[in-house]
Amino acid sequence: MFLKIIRPIRRHLLLLASSFMLSACAGTVEMVRDVARTLADIDLGGVADVFGWQTVEMSPEQAAQLSIIPGARPLWQNLIDESQAGAFSPVFDNGAVYGTGVNGRVVRFDAASGRETASVDTQRVLSGGIGAGDGMLLVATFKGEVLAFDEKTGKALWTAQVSSEVLSPPRAEGGMVVVRAGDGRIFSLDAATGKRKWVYQGATPSLTVRNFGGVLISRGMVFAGFAGGKLIAINLSNGSVTWEAVVSRPRGATELERITDVTSLPVMDEHQICAVAYQGRVACFDIATGNQIWARDVSSNAGLAMDNHYVYVSEERGAIVAYDKNDGTSVWRQEMLSGVKLSPPLVRDNRIVVADSQGYVNLIRNSDGVIVGRSATDGSAIITRPVPLPDGFVVQTRKGGLYALSTETTGVLPPPGVLPAAAQSPQLQYLCSLVPFCKP
């Protein structure tokens, strides 16, 4: 009984802490900006833990069951800057993996070996990244600066200013860069110059949750979830709202209980788009009209994924649930990870890849929810979605570790930037000897 009382209290205290960090009240916006500007000078451990990422409630029996699951086959690992103040995610583009961290270094890695091949120092304290598209790499700062670099040369292209800190990767498509600011505004910038083209600003509740959701761009539209449980479709060319849908409505007697924010990216297929809200619901809508197709009660601050058959949700308390994407029928529920915080899921081959707050990467069979693989990284939380690679996927930890893994199981991680022994052929070693600073 004591634990049943304490857990809701702790959850509300964490939410209260997050509200002090990023409340959207008009009278506190400037204060929040000032705090954000000084994040580099303070202890960020508590700031990064607004959802209890450092708290684990796992029983010994549960841990024992998980310990016997075979590991995922490793591909490579490397290291980049720590990310305690943000939720940084690598990006795969044109055969390379790009990554960054709070200290401002943007690094290119070979996607096959994990070897660092180039880097550029932005000379900024970064808060969001990394985005790629239209031949650019995009990062952002706590001061609301958006920085664009040439993907091939690393040359700085332009710097733009938005209204507040940027916590998610900027997105580039169709000659535009779309940026979501911490105060809820969405900015469209010209990809060639960085000049502002339009701004969307919707109503924001007085109490909101700090999130790293960002935006989804597809079919000439910008899709984004908002505080208050709303999903908005915006015309990419001019910023006009095409439709607005309700994922979840606020419920409860207090402001804390009534928080129902969409804090993660929506997912979509050819016909529908789905989103999930914290303390709310998962819901799917017709892409063209915004009409609701189905909805189910659930709470998630992590996110969801979709394949040809199911919608997969990482629940707030560590369960993974699969719903039939046509009607929302619950298909399976995996609760072995209950007690840890989960990343958004990734669908890869016939696996669901989900990372957690203990730094583990979990492979779940998509047909029945069985955990078939589980690999440790560096012990720090992984809060962003795993990123697909041609032969697997890569994750970034809070400590800055980059870990590339296969969806196949078993193996031990090689040293940073080193290929598995089977790939170290004499031909590869000879070619590497011809290139300065090459390490086979």
Image (cartoon, grey):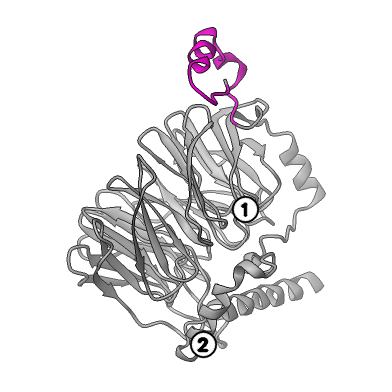
Residue 43: image x %, image y %? 70, 68
Give the residue at mark 1. Answer: 82
Front-most of residues 292 and 124: 124
Residue 398: image x %, image y %? 62, 53
Q: Amino acid at mark 1?
A: Glu
Task: Answer whether residue 367 is visible to the viewer in this image.
Answer: no
Q: Nearer the viewer, mark 2 or mark 1?
A: 1
Q: Earlier in the sequence, mark 2 or mark 1?
A: 2
Give the residue at mark 2. Answer: 28
SS assignment at label 2: helix
* Residue drawn at (48%, 84%) of the image: 29
* Residue drawn at (71%, 40%) of the image: 66
Q: Quadrant of residue 425?
A: top right
Furthest toward the left, the residue is 237
Residue 411: image x %, image y %? 65, 25
Furthest toward the bottom, the residue is 27
For residue 239, side relative to residue 40 (left or right) = left
Crowding around mark 2 (Cα neighbors within 10 Å: few <14, some 14 to 19, many 20+) is some
Q: Quadrant of residue 21?
A: bottom right
Q: Residues in magenta?
A: 417-439
| Residue 434 located within the stretch drawn in magenta | yes
Vertical arrangement, residue 49 with respect to residue 335, above or below? below
Q: Amino acid at mark 2?
A: Thr
Front-most of residues 332 and 429: 429
